[in-house]
């Protein structure tokens, strides 16, 4: 009476396991047992810089030959078995040398596949999640290229008993990756596999190793760190265009930029281990902080030199200026009744326009800007020139007269390019600076120089920084 295929397999397994000792490796006493291994990576991540570790989910596939499990059944060359069969046969005690916490998936059932061939070959595949250490050199962070290794070996068997080798087969590499594998912060650059032996006091052990070469994305760091810090540094330069007498505005702006840069630096440091060296990101943050501090120190220098220049003027000049001021005040009190706040001039073809005119104190060397007063000017459409009389006396807030000489002369240029006007606004009018008093309300030469030195040097730093670190990334 012939048996069914299921009965034949059951009878076969019972025969194979009779007198089978799972404690003894196949081919004991002979040549080393060769265990062919390959890996299929299903997913990878996260990669944690704080713990210097990474996680991945993969299928670990191993093949070996056991003469004790040969069989001969008609029309049956391979038998696929359940995981319960593994309890009764020998299997390699593979482990991960740099593993920290690895688990085998058991939902809904243990994710293990076992197949026996008629010639005694055994194929076993397991779905596992591996968490392994990944030593990183963060000197170039975030322009670094981490290399995360996975080291596989046998626990207890030396090279005299077991040899681990990579199975190449038809695949170009024994370690394959799914095409849809994606990571939030990295790209898989390439994979390098190798096998070697490692010696210790117990003997030589066969080792398999695979290195995952990763490439970090820069987009997150540019948007969250580099761009905000660059804008903050540029914001600190605004103080060079603020009046030197506006101390609260310039000091508050400087302190705000320093604190903002420091806050960004602390947030970035939370995601990094406490390494004893500066990363590329640290270098950039420190340079930005130095520029913010330099803007504050620059204002201190402007304020200090301004006071020194005022206090060190020759006594004869100060006495002459005081005499001029007294004469102006006396003349203003005499003509106080003759002057109003608005003056109207008529000549030829005219168009009335009202402007705010600054009181000006004129001496033989420089011109001092004072408080403003409303004055009505006549606009000559024929000559396209706006003028006031050569000499006017305007009242100030105390009722004292101030003498002005050639107070306002302006010729409009309606065809001038807007970019030229904008550039003059940014760098300042040097002609106006020449005619203004450098010791009272004019723009400091330090401010004028800083408007060019700070942006220029910061731009050169950017060129050097990105050329150096992106060069090491290639």
Image: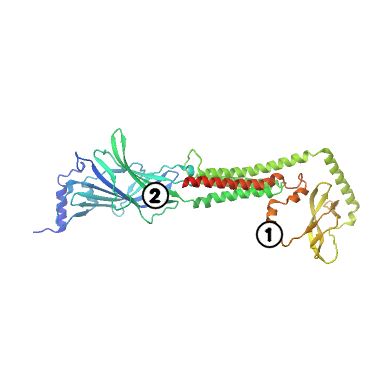
Residue that sits furthest to the left in the current view: 1
Q: Could you tell me which residue is drawn at 69 percent across and 51 percent down?
A: 427
Residue drawn at the location 62% of the way across and 43% of the way down: 293
| Residue closer to the observer: 78 or 459 | 459
Q: How crowded is mark 1: few (under 14 residues within 10 Å), some or many (20 or more)?
A: few
Q: Residue furthest top?
A: 201
Q: Can the viewer see residue 314?
A: yes
- Is the C-beta separation of discs 1 and 2 under 8 Å? no
Q: Circle 1 is placed at which residue position? A: 418
Q: Any mark on residue 264, and which?
A: none
Answer few, some or many: residues within 10 Å of disc 2's Cα (few below 14, many 20 plus, some between 14 and 19).
few
Q: What residue is shown with label 2?
A: 190
**In the picture provided, is 317 more to the left or to the right than 9?**
right
Q: Quadrant of residue 389?
A: bottom right
Q: Counting residues from the N terminus, which is met first, the one under dot 1 or under dot 2?
A: 2
Q: In which quarter of the image is the N terminus?
A: bottom left
Give how far across and how far down residue 113 sits, in percent.
Answer: 26, 52
**Nearer-the-camera pick, 450 or 82:** 450
Q: Is residue 286 above or below residue 79?
A: above
Mark-to-mark CA distance, 1 and 2? 53 Å
The single residue placed furthest to the bottom in the displayed view is 349
Residue 461: percent from the left, percent from the top? 57, 45
Q: Can residue 267 be seen in this view?
A: no
Judged from the image, the secondary structure of the residue bearing numbered disc 1 is: helix
Front position in the image: 182 or 143: 143
Point out residue 191 in the picture as x, y percentages from the top left corner: 37, 48
Where residue 206 appears, as percent x and y from the top left, is 29, 40
Q: Left of 201 or right of it: where is 259? A: right
- SS category of the residue bearing label 2: strand
């Amino acid at each position: 009476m012939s048996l069914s295929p299921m009965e034949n397999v059951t009878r076969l397994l019972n025969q194979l396991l009779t007198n089978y000792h799972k404690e003894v490796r196949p081919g004991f006493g002979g040549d080393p047992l060769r265990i062919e291994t390959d890996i299929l990576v299903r997913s990878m991540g996260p990669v944690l810089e704080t713990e210097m570790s990474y996680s991945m989910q993969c299928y670990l596939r191993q093949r070996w030959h056991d003469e004790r499990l040969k069989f001969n059944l008609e029309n049956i060359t391979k038998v696929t078995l359940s995981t319960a069969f593994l309890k009764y046969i020998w299997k390699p005690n593979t482990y991960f040398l740099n593993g920290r916490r690895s688990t085998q998936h058991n939902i809904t059932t243990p994710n293990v596949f076992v197949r026996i061939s008629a010639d005694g070959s055994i194929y076993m595949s397991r779905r596992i999640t591996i968490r392994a250490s990944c030593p990183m050199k963060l000197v170039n962070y975030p322009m670094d290229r981490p290399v995360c290794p996975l080291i596989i070996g046998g626990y207890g068997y030396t090279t005299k008993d077991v040899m681990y080798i990579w199975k190449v087969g038809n695949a170009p590499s024994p370690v394959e990756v799914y095409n849809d594998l994606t990571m939030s912060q990295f790209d898989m650059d390439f994979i390098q596999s190798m096998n070697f032996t490692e010696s210790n006091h117990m003997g030589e052990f066969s080792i398999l190793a695979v290195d995952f070469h990763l490439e970090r994305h820069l987009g997150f760091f540019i948007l969250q760190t580099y761009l905000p810090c660059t804008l903050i540094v540029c914001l600190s330069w605004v103080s060079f265009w603020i009046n030197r007498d506006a101390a609260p505005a310039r000091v508050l702006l400087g302190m705000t930029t320093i604190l903002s840069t420091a806050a960004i630096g602390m947030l970035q440091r939370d995601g990094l281990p406490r390494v004893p060296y500066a990363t590329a990101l640290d270098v950039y943050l420190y340079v930005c902080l130095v520029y913010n501090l330099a803007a504050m120190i620059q204002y201190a220098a402007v304020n200090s030199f301004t006071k020194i220049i005022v206090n060190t003027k020759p006594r004869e000049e100060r006495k002459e200026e005081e005499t001029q001021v007294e004469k102006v005040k006396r003349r203003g009190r005499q003509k106080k009744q003759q002057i109003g706040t608005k003056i109207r001039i008529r000549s030829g073809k005219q168009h009335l326009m009202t402007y705010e005119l600054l009181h000006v104190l004129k001496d033989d060397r420089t011109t001092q800007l004072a408080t403003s007063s409303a004055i009505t000017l006549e606009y000559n459409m024929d000559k396209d020139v706006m003028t006031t009389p050569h000499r006017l006396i305007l009242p100030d807030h105390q009722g004292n007269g101030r003498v002005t000489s050639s107070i306002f002369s302006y010729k409009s240029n309606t065809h001038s390019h807007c970019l030229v006007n904008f550039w003059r606004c940014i760098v300042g009018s040097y002609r106006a600076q020449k005619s203004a008093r450098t010791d009272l309300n004019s723009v400091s030469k330090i401010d004028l120089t800083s408007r060019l030195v700070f942006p220029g040097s910061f731009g050169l730093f950017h060129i050097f920084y990105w050329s150096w670190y992106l060069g090491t990334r290639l």
